[in-house]
Amino acid sequence: MTLERIRNSRLGRRYIGDRAFYALVLGLLVPIVIQNIISNFVSLLDNIMVGAVSTEEMNGVSISNQLIFVFNLCVFGGMSGATIFAAQFYGAKNEDGVRDSFRYTILLAVGLSAIAIAVLVGFSRPLIGYYINDVEAVGGAEDTLKAGMGYVRIMLFGLFPFAMSQAYAGTLRVTGETKLPMAASVTSVLVNLVGNYILIFGHLGAPALGARGAAVATVISRYVEMLIIVVVAHRRNRRDGTYGFLSHAYSHFHIPGWLAKRITVKGMPLLVNELLWSVAVALLAQLYSLRGLNVVAANTITSTITNLFNVFFLSMGTAASVLVGRKLGERNDESSRACARQIIAFDIVICVVVAAVMFAVAPLLPQIYRKATVDARRLAVAMIRICACSAPLSAFANCSYFILRSGGRTGITFLFDSGYSWIIQIPLVYSLVHFTDLGILYVFGACHAAELIKDIFGYILMKKGVWIRNIVSEPEPEVAYEKAEAE
């Protein structure tokens, strides 16, 4: 009775949806959450297994993954522009348009992989060394650098298959195929987990490779994921034409100039945003590392554990993008606003519950890292609790970002995401680290508290409705193809 009264109140009608709404949200959310939980849980086990070898190995892998993280997000951001157009073409039943958009993602996968390999081959040593600042632990610093270098050299072989998997998965999803990418991803993380167990510790007669074993297992899993998606998708298409855009997709790679230009213009802000945001995350980790290797270990433990808890609100961003995007496609502004309000409210409520659990169990989780120092584990407990307290702020900001993006406002999302990181977060943390003697917990806490500034801007943008924009009904792509066919 109380719940019904709340639902029928003025605030309830504004921020609480009906059962059909939550069924729709959960239908989209649950598969994404399951996939991400499995992926993050394997990442946690991976981290624990490397950490069981030594803290230096764990730190080396963590630092190296900061560099790989930049590449991964550039792939996601760069391909987002092409998938926006692929979705429009698919809705218009324009198979040629979907195929050309897919070709764009393939070329982008090759180009980004080549650039990343060149950068990491030439600059991995100074980039990894940039994070190692504990002059009181020379031996630990040298071991960390050695582990990181060995890990990166092997991970180079996994960059291209990862990018190719994302090119296929992104285009398949816009056609409604979500099960194949999910099955490939789940299989990949399981292969990675088994490979880690065998190669890190040297089980089943294999050599004990430590951090290098973790890299080998990851590279193998990347190829497994790529082969599953590529082979199954092409086989199904040859059998019954399930994925028409794959027919003759590799016969040539000529993309109409007008389309390549539009995809680049629309997608460039997304690529640059992901690049700058990921670099900002890596730079924040480097600034924290100036407080010593114990902080590097604590930050590694914290990020690995909190990623597992943050799966829900991070996955909610994808659901928000899809649901609000559909409403925008219907050209119903009020319904779009209501959907945005209700999904943000739902996200925050669930996030508060999850954050409370994370805060309560924080003292227990870092204890699984037996080789980490007592100081590193103590710092990790406090940092996890800081993340728990700031989680609702992050949830609101994340949902706002994806809602803005659903309306095609890529320029605004660039300022909202990367602009905040480089204008607010980086200067704040840099100043506190270099010009004060504040301990790492005060610095870490101030960085997370600053999320409130981003939330204020997000609230203003949501309130003004700058994101309410229909991009699906724009006629230019279809008109351009008709002209090209006429010529």
Image (cartoon, grey):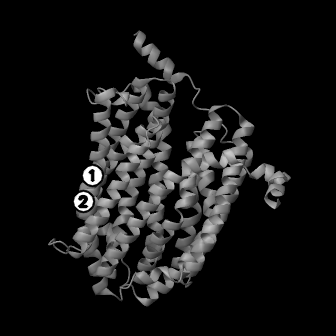
At mark 1, the secondary structure is: helix
- x and y percent of residue 113 in the render? 30, 49
Query: Callout 1: few (<14), some (14-19), or many (20+) C-alpha neighbours within 10 Å?
Result: many
Lateral position of residue 152 relative to residue 407, left or right: left
The residue under label 2 is: 121
State the residue lying farthest toward the top.
Answer: 486
Q: Are marks 2 and 1 in contact (CB under 8 Å)?
A: no
Q: Inspect this view and state whether residue 243 appears.
A: yes
Q: Amino acid at mark 1?
A: Val
State the residue lying farthest toward the front.
Answer: 1
In front of the other: 53 or 264 = 53
Query: Callout 2: few (<14), some (14-19), or many (20+) C-alpha neighbours within 10 Å?
Result: few
Lateral position of residue 333 relative to residue 149, left or right: right
Quadrant of the rendered structure where residue 201 is? bottom left
Tag of residue 224: 1
In front of the other: 266 or 470 = 470
- x and y percent of residue 218 in the render? 29, 61
Question: Tag 1 or tag 2, which sits nearer the N-term?
Answer: 2
Q: Quadrant of the C terminus?
A: top left
Quadrant of the rendered structure where residue 72 is? bottom left
Tag of residue 27: none
Closer mark to the observer between disc 2 and disc 1: 1
Q: Inspect this view and state whether residue 432 appears.
A: no
At mark 2, the secondary structure is: helix
Lateral position of residue 324 relative to residue 178, left or right: right
Q: Amino acid at mark 2?
A: Val
Lateral position of residue 248 relative to residue 308, left or right: left
- x and y percent of residue 361 in the render? 55, 79
- x and y percent of residue 221 in the render? 28, 57
> What residue appears at the point 27 percent right and 55 percent down from the top-left corner?
158
> What residue appears at the point 27 percent right and 52 percent down from the top-left corner?
224
> What residue appears at the point 55 percent right and 74 percent down from the top-left corner?
431
